[in-house]
Amino acid sequence: MSEIIAPGSPEGTLLQLREVVKVYDSGDVPFTALKGIDLDVHTGEFVGIIGKSGSGKTTLINMITGIDHPTSGQIIIDGTPVHRLGENDLARWRGRTIGVVFQFFQLLPTLTVLENIVLPMDFCHMWAPKERVERAMNLLEQVELADQANKLPAALSGGQQQRAAIARALANDPPILAADEPTGNLDSKTADAVFSLFERLVEHHKTIIMVTHDNDMANRVRRALHVSDGEIVEERVHRPRVGA
């Protein structure tokens, strides 16, 4: 059981959105997907973004990850004004700052699981080349996939592929993990295992922002933001009761 409490004062602000607006001009009538979003996320928080299809939750996480650009407003992450970055700088920044986990894994099918984990380190020139395989194997051990390292993704189950995708997202030790419906394509038991992995990462000071339509999952995060019609309409902060 959990109770709604007033937000506390976490140790430091890692992410700030100020008056973020996103307008899509496709079609005859422009569509405003986000309507002046203000948001602070602090180091070590586990934040869930919930809402119905079309509410703007995926657009919001795409703003945070730099996958999409705001029409107006400011996005500052770990001191970097992300809204001002060009595409090349944005790709390098994303590779070092945010690990992205998708609903459908998006592992490269022609690379082994191990090679998929090493790839972000190669792209961002992180760690010495001889250290990258060792680090990748360590991450695979953490997600209990070391014995699958030399297999292609197609040989893994959905849950195993998602755990491999999480290991890949952690390859460059980013301060933030952003997950868009990471359990939406998994059965309930596997989804619970993935969520438990996220909880362990938060215990080790990772900041996680997760989009989900699953209210049960949303009730397990430290802080849940309900998005509707492009606005944050409700915020809930949860704390387990002693002895619950």
Image (cartoon, rainbow, N blue to C red):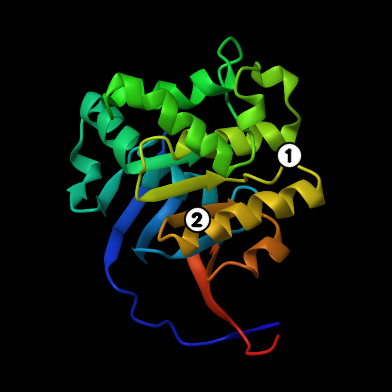
Judging from the image, what secondary structure is the residue with disc 1 in? loop
User: Is residue 108 toward the left or the right of residue 160 in the image?
Assistant: left
The x, y position of residue 166, in whole percent, is 54, 39
Residue type at mark 1?
Answer: Asn
Residue 52 visible in the displayed image: no
User: Which residue is found at the position 66% from the left and 25% from the top?
Assistant: 148
Mark 1 is surrounded, within 10 Å at the Cα level, by few (under 14), some (14 to 19) or many (20 or more) other residues, namely some
Judging from the image, what secondary structure is the residue with disc 2 in? helix
The x, y position of residue 6, in whole percent, is 46, 87
Total marks shown come to 2
User: Which residue is found at the position 66% from the left and 21% from the top?
Assistant: 153
User: Which residue is found at the position 58% from the left and 16% from the top?
Assistant: 112
User: Is residue 198 toward the left or the right of residue 73 in the image?
Assistant: right
Instruction: Tell me the residue that label 1 is attached to.
Output: 185
Which mark sits nearer the N-terminus, 1 or 2? 1
239 or 82, which is in the foreground?
Answer: 239
Instruction: Tell me the residue that label 2 is attached to.
Output: 201
60 or 21, which is in the foreground?
Answer: 60
Residue type at mark 2?
Answer: Leu
Whole-number angstrom distance, CA of label 1 to CA of label 2? 21 Å
Residue, far bottom: 242
Residue 186, relative to residue 155: is it above or below? below
Residue 189, relative to residue 221: is it above or below? above
211 or 93, which is in the foreground?
Answer: 93
Residue, far top: 110
User: Is residue 12 toward the left or the right of residue 137 in the image?
Assistant: left
Evaluate if marks 1 and 2 touch, with contact meaning CB atoms under 8 Å apart: no
